[in-house]
Amino acid sequence: MFADSPLEQLGDSLGFADVSTGTVALVTTTLLLSAALAYRKLTEPKVQGITPPFIPSTIPFLGQAVSFGSSPIEFLLAAYEKYGPVFSFTMVGKTFTYLVGSESSALMFNSKNENLNAEDVYSRLVTPVFGKGVAYDVPNSIFMEQKKMFKTGLNIVRFREHVHIIEEETKDYFKRWGASGQNDLFQALSELIILTASHCLHGREIRTRLDEHVAQLYADLDGGFTHLAWLLPGWLPFPSFRKRDRAQREMKKIFHEVISKRRADPNPDDDMLQTLIDSKYKTGRPLTDDEISGMLIGLLLAGQHTSSTTSSWLGFFLAKDKELQDRVYEEQKQVCGEGFAPLDYDQLKEMSLLDRCLKETLRLRPPIMTMMRMCRTSQNVLGYTIPPGHQVCVSPTTNHRLPDTWKDFDKFIPDRFIDPEVANSEKFAYIPFGAGRHRCIGESFAYVQIKTIFSILIRKYELDLVDGYFPEVNVSTMIHTPTNPVIKYRLRHPDIKI
């Protein structure tokens, strides 16, 4: 499991799709980082205490990059079996310490940001996409204020309105599918998630401008979330970096125009955009147009990953288990009536089977494979001392697959969640949206969005796998999407309009 692979596999395993255009820059950066790493090793202070077990590698600088990049979950589970719940390894000049299982994971989720720091890890990745002055580009205290502003706008009153918006967007979108056929489910749901999230979270003004050009801008921004962007400086001349930066400038310009018009509107809509315009920091300072733009871009793109990936996997799990799919369809009739009247928020809450299917999808296919923090001060866990400079990681996917925690851990069994305490049997055994102070603020909206979309989709279509093919996980991307996600579908009732 931990044998070194050939160096030439690195590009594929880490998803470096456009490395060839910047090979010189990459090699130069690698040499500089190798020298810096060697110097740091010679000068760093000695650690007091027992450090975590270390997985050795004979490849300088790269370390376990290829082995981890090609099969990350298998790598982590094998390391857990061999080394226990806390272990370290190097990868591309950095040392990673993984916390596997509930007991060790508590360190991350109960930590303070000054000890295990998020900005040190994520700023390089997200700041070029969201922009300066928001999220991980600001002190944690400011980011927490920005998150509270979001929470003000993500409330049940708004969710009740969102259900109707998402339902209409979904019905309109799937008109293009026709009576039967095959289609790329991930692409379709990614497009629909952008449409519904933009309408609900950005407001009608942005939604009306969401044409193919703007959709491509979102795609180029989204293309900035890569291993390449996380590992290497943003000024390197890779095509994905240039597309990301250009899209960021254009999207900011569009948002600024919309915000300016909204500020001048004497009767503005009551939505997230207006919430941010009306919000103020504790100092009394309102948000600038640039801050609002960056926060709205971040809100959409962060949630888009979760919802599009999760909803796609949900579709394939239901297509694979036709009996379960029929039960989900019958639940729609039981909750909403044979005539399928327009959905409402209270009906979504009653769809317990669909809810369990979504929970189980998030268990087996959590969209974020690893959550990370930079260790700034020595941390003690299970008898080990983690030194400053280590990147401390928890993998939801790994925690969700531990056989000593989950019975039949590798099987899709939604009814395991009939017992509401299953997910809480161990505090950090189930963490698709993080936990504690680090829990995702968009979790409730994601449930509303996905359950509404699938209510409409499963009422209209019967879903099938194409020639029995269930997608493999694409581990080359930071979000674990389905590979070749084509699904077969046909109308359930061709004579009934849904």
Image: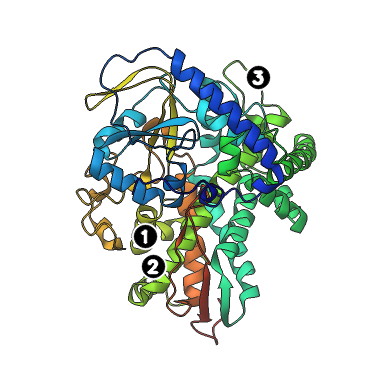
Q: Quadrant of residue 331?
A: bottom left
Residue, x 78% and y 42% (percent of image)?
250
Q: Secondary structure at mark 3?
A: loop
**Amino acid at pointer 1:** Glu
Q: Which residue is mark 1?
A: 350
Note whether 205 is above or below 117 in the view shown.
below
Give me the C-alpha separation between circle 3 and circle 1. 42 Å
- Residue sitting at x 24%, y 45%: 81
* Pointer 2 residue: 335
Q: How many marks?
A: 3
Q: CA–CA distance between discs 1 and 2? A: 7 Å
**How many C-alpha atoms fall within 10 Å of the one at disc 3: few (<14), some, or many (≥20)?**
few
Judging depth in this view, the residue of 188 and 395 nearest the camera is 395
Determine which residue is flagged by label 3: 285
Work out whether residue 387 or residue 217 is closer to the camera in this orientation and state it.
387
**Which residue type carries mark 3?**
Arg
Which residue sits furthest bottom? 495
Left or right position of 189 against 40: right
